[in-house]
Amino acid sequence: MGITDPNLGGPEAMVFEFPAASSTPFWMKDTLLPLSVAWVGPDGVVLGVTDMAPCGADTSNCPLYPPPGSYLWAIEMAQGRPQNWGIETGARVEIGVPC
C-alpha cells in the first residue's frame, strides 16, 4: 500500500502466510501499482495467479480478487513477475528457501 516504485525494489515479493487454509479474497485499497498475486495451496502448489488493478482510497470502486481455491500462502509481486519467475498454475514453490 502506498508504494510508487514500479520495480518494487527489484526482484521482491511479499508473502502472506495464513495459520490455516483460507479462501479470503484480496483487494487493492490504497495500492498505486498493478500487482499479481499467486495463490499457493498447503502442498506448495500454485493454485492460480491473478492480476490486480490499482485502487485508491475510495473503496466503493475496489474489486475483490477471489482465489481459485483454499490457499495457505499468497505471494504479491509486480505484474509480469510471476511469468518471469516461472510462477504459474501447477508450479511448486518453496516458501523460505533462497532463490
Image (cartoon, rainbow, N blue to C red):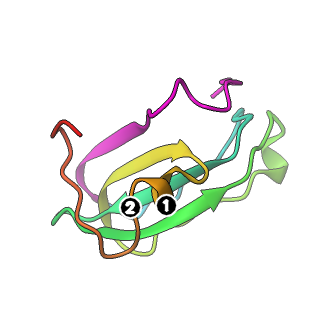
Q: Quadrant of residue 48?
A: bottom left
Residue 2 part of the magenta-drawn span: yes
Range shown magenta: 1-21
Q: Is 25 placed left or right of 64 in the picture?
A: left
Asked which secondary structure carries label 2, the reply is loop
Instruction: Identify the residue at horizontal 31%, vertical 76% (top origin).
Output: 90
Q: Position of residue 35 (x, y in %)?
A: 61, 47
Give the quarter of the figure containing the C terminus: top left
The residue indicated by pointer 2 is: 86
Residue type, label 1: Gln
Q: Is 32 placed left or right of 76 in the picture?
A: right
Spatial CA span between label 1 and label 2: 5 Å
Instruction: Identify the residue at horizontal 84%, vertical 39% (top origin).
Output: 58
Q: Quadrant of residue 56?
A: top right
Q: Position of residue 22 (x, y in %)?
A: 33, 60
Asked which secondary structure carries label 1, the reply is helix
Question: From the viewer's perspective, is residue 32 above or below residue 25?
Answer: above
State the residue lying farthest toward the front.
84
Mark number, residue 83? 1
